[in-house]
Every structure is written in structure tokens, then in C-alpha cells.
Image (cartoon, grey):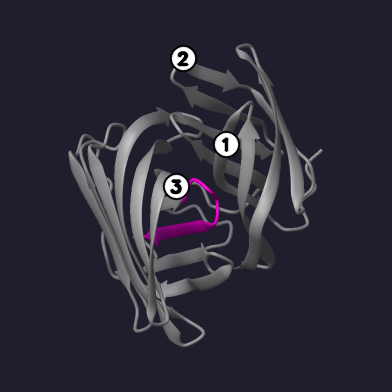
Amino acid sequence: MRLEGRQTYSESVQVACGDPAGNRFVVLRLCQYPEMGVAWLWAAAVIDGRFALMVDNEAPWSGTSSVQDGAQAASYAAATRAASFSFSRSGPRDRPSAATARFEGSHRRRRFAVSALFEPAAGFTGLLQGRSEQFGAVRAEVTIGGQSYVIEGPGQWHEQPQTDPRFVHPFVYASLWGPGIFSTLLQTEEGSGGYVIAPTGVTRFDRAAFAAPGRTRRVRASGPDGSMDLMLHEVRSYGFGVYRQTWRGAFVRTRLGDTPMIGFANTFPTGYRPA
């Protein structure tokens, strides 16, 4: 709670991926606050209908900043008695050559672990200040209880350092991935936008409009480069507390024309109803 609305430096890093059929997903996110000695640890997975989740928004953390201007690599790490996270990136933040992520924790007192390798193919910087979003191929091994599963498919890696407080304004944020095509869409009360990266080039949007959260959810995007109309179909939704609100995540399937895509659409707070 001592972070809510507070102007303090923080660094977030995330990796997410799914199998092309949209039956298996995983996402790992670490947000570290070097000046406050706190880290947020999030891990979620869906494996053929089986779900696992680990969240800690009050993890004591004694690390230092991982983001250095012009650095050719970065490593993020945080650990508690219950869980550990580590992320490693080779190459500069806006043009990485490879990245890895590891998580070890539990879900309902059973082992929940993830090891992921990310190989970038395309990227975009500048949708939000400081945010670098990379897309490509991911191979992840997910262990739930005594069973291990492999996910091989498209995914996303993103990093975002900032000093402004996080989770102050309502938002909807979707990240979508397909064979050679990737998209990010964002709607907030302060503005919206997004883009699609395709083999033919990048289409930028200055407006994105999401319907209310649900099993199906329409999103329309438009801008000077063109428009896009998608129907997101939820594979699994889930939620947890962030300050006094509930954050809602959803793994989704969709199609852009004839191209199948998978990804996620996250809403904060759950009660946010975009106009």
C-alpha cells in the first residue's frame, strides 16, 4: 500500500507466450522498486484447462537497478522464501538478441515452476514512454505439481522503467501474437492507441476501443494507417488484488483476417468499463 500513487523509480520486465492452438499459456512478470526495497512477483499459466497462479505484491527485495542507458545486457532477480524470479536479456533493450526467464514457486502448495527462452523477431518502442516491446518465438517448460509441459509458440518480452506511479489510471492492455504478426492495443482514460507489426510493415493506431470484459470481447482500433476490428475469445480469466482494486487478466484467442492469433487482454480495475 505504501507504493500506491507514489512517485518512485520502478522497473518491470515480463515474458509471455502460448502454443499456436491457444490451449497453453504462461506469463511471468517482475516489477522491482529499488528505492523502496519491494518487488511484485506475478506468475500465471494455463495448461490444457489446468490453471496455476502465484502473486506477491509485497515481496521484500534488496536488489539494485537493472536498467542502465546504453547497456548491452540486463539481469533482473528477486526472491522470497516462497518464490524466486530471474530474467536475463542479451543485447540492448530496444534490440535484444535473446532473453531468458525463470520462476520457482508454488500453487496451492504444489510446485509451480517455469523456464523460458525468448528469441526476438520484431519489436516496437514508444507506445508508452520508456516501454520496449519485443515479439518472437518462445520455448517454455512449465511444471505444475509433478507434471511438466512444454509450450512452443509466439510470445512477447517487454521492459518498462519509469518514475511515475503504476496502477493509478484505469486501462485495458492487449498483447496478441501470430505467425509473423504481432499487435499491442491500449486504452486508458488519458488516451489510447496501438500497432500491428506484419511482414508488410507496421500499422499504427491512435485509437483503440474495447468492449466490457467477458467471454467474448470486441476491440476496434483505428488511425491514419488503417483500422482493425477483432473479437477476443477468452480461454481463461483470473484476478487478484492491486491496492484496493482487482486486476483482471485473460488469456485469449482471436483472428486478424485469416490469421489466428493468441495472447492476453488485461483490465484494471475489473470494474473499468471503457467508453
Task: Please name the residue shown 39% across and 30% down the image.
Answer: 123
Q: Which of the marked residues, 1 or 3, is nearer the chain's N terminus?
A: 3
For label 2, the residue is 200
Q: Which mark is residue 260?
A: 1
Which mark's residue is nearer the viewer, 1 or 3? 1
Give the side of residue 91 with respect to residue 138, left or right: left
Whole-percent x and y of residue 66?
A: 26, 52
Q: Nearer the viewer, residue 10 or 201?
A: 201
Which image quarter is the C terminus in? top right
Which mark's residue is nearer the viewer, 2 or 3? 2
Q: Which of the marked residues, 2 or 3, is nearer the chain's N terminus?
A: 3
Q: Check disc 2 and give the amino acid type.
A: Thr
Question: In the picture shown, does residue 241 fall above or below 33?
Answer: below
Whole-percent x and y of residue 110?
A: 44, 85
Question: In the picture shown, does residue 65 fall above or below 205?
Answer: below
Question: In the picture shown, does residue 119 fall above or below 115?
Answer: above
Q: Residue furthest bottom?
A: 109
Question: In the picture shown, does residue 58 fall above or below 152?
Answer: below
Q: Check disc 1 and give the amino acid type.
A: Pro
For label 3, the residue is 163
